[in-house]
Image: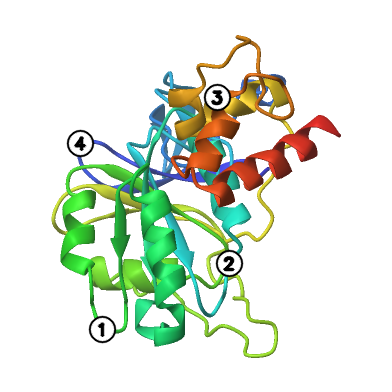
């Protein structure tokens, strides 16, 4: 990790190039985007003395002290598997953060996509706020702005879903680099190389973060996963208190899946993630 970082003074708003005090090399604590630090000026640079206690921390993308995670998803160009979104939501729940789901690039959807869009909204709007957007047509941008006002937010999602394009619309002047999705590979290229906090003109902060296609959840214990699926956590009143909702008798969750109360796609992804973290 680099010893240099940029710190914005909370009073003057001046951005100062800083280095870490040598003792940081002896600890596991390193500053991440969103940290509040104490620093001193030494000639023309600053020296970070300490990192104040974080109210929360998202492991990937690595950021601290945020109010909400904006999970950006697309049905076309690229077509993102729901498993990717559900893994991301697991990380958000694990960090005890609020999630906002953005279904982006709706201008690319055709009549053939209407059923998929409807099922997506039926599944996720019962669990989290969902905003449908298009950076190209500006659809949903006003609604998105309302969710961002006076909050510290972080965009998260795989490459190519249009995070930087949305930020360029809601934060004029950011001029973030964007990249067309590959026609052949149906996936985006990484255009954001480092996370950075941006001031929003209407109040609040937002972090643009590097895109990623592989979301790692293997650090999660299998018996804790049920607490990171909101609908399973809320309805998990099973015959046995330690039920993991796999093949145990008297499982209420499996009954609710059959009844359509819990989306089958979400439950199937729960089983997939459970298997993945159990085999680590």
Residue bearing mark 4: 11
Q: Secondary structure at mark 2?
A: loop
Viewer-side residue, 127 vs 237 = 237
Callout 3 environment at 10 Å: few (<14), some (14 to 19), or many (20+)?
some
Q: Earlier in the sequence, mark 2 or mark 4?
A: 4
- Give the alpha-carbon distance from disc 2 to disc 1, as whole Å: 21 Å
Location of residue 61 with respect to 28 vertically, above or below: below
Q: Position of residue 71 (x, y in %)?
A: 44, 53
Q: Position of residue 41 (x, y in %)?
A: 39, 33
Residue drawn at x 20%, y 42% is 12
- Give the alpha-carbon distance from disc 1 to disc 4, as whole Å: 38 Å
- Give the alpha-carbon distance from disc 2 to disc 4, as whole Å: 42 Å
Q: Please identify, in this view, whether the residue under mark 1 or under mark 3 is nearer the observer.
A: 3
Residue bearing mark 1: 137
User: Which quarter of the image is occupied by the C terminus?
Assistant: top right
Q: Secondary structure at mark 4?
A: loop
Q: Are marks 1 and 4 in contact (CB under 8 Å)?
A: no
Location of residue 122 with respect to 45 vertically, above or below: below
Residue bearing mark 2: 80
Residue drawn at x 66%, y 49% is 215
């Amino acid at each position: 990790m680099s010893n240099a970082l940029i710190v914005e003074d909370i009073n003057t708003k001046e951005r100062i190039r800083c280095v870490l005090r040598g003792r940081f090399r002896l600890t596991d604590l390193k500053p991440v985007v969103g940290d509040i630090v104490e620093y001193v000026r030494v000639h023309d640079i600053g020296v970070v003395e300490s990192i104040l206690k974080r109210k929360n921390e998202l492991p990937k993308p690595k950021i601290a002290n945020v109010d909400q995670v904006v999970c950006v998803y697309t049905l076309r160009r690229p077509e993102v598997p729901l498993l990717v979104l559900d893994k991301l939501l697991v990380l958000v729940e694990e960090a005890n953060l609020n999630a906002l789901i953005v279904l982006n690039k709706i201008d690319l959807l055709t009549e053939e996509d209407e059923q998929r869009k409807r099922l997506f909204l039926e599944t996720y709007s019962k669990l989290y706020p969902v905003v449908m957007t298009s950076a190209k047509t500006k659809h949903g941008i006003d609604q998105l702005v309302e969710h961002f006002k006076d909050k510290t937010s972080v965009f998260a999602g795989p490459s190519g879903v249009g995070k930087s394009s949305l930020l360029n619309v809601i934060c004029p002047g950011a001029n973030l680099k964007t990249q067309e999705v590959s026609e052949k590979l149906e996936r985006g290229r990484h255009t954001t190389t480092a996370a950075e906090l941006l001031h929003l003109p209407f109040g609040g902060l937002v972090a643009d973060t590097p895109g990623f296609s592989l979301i790692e959840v293997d650090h999660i214990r299998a018996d804790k996963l049920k607490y990171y699926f909101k609908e399973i956590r809320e309805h998990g009143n099973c015959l046995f208190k330690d039920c993991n909702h796999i093949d145990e008798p008297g499982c209420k969750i499996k009954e609710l899946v059959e009844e359509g109360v819990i989306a089958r796609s979400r439950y199937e992804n729960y089983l997939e993630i459970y298997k993945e973290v159990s085999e680590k």
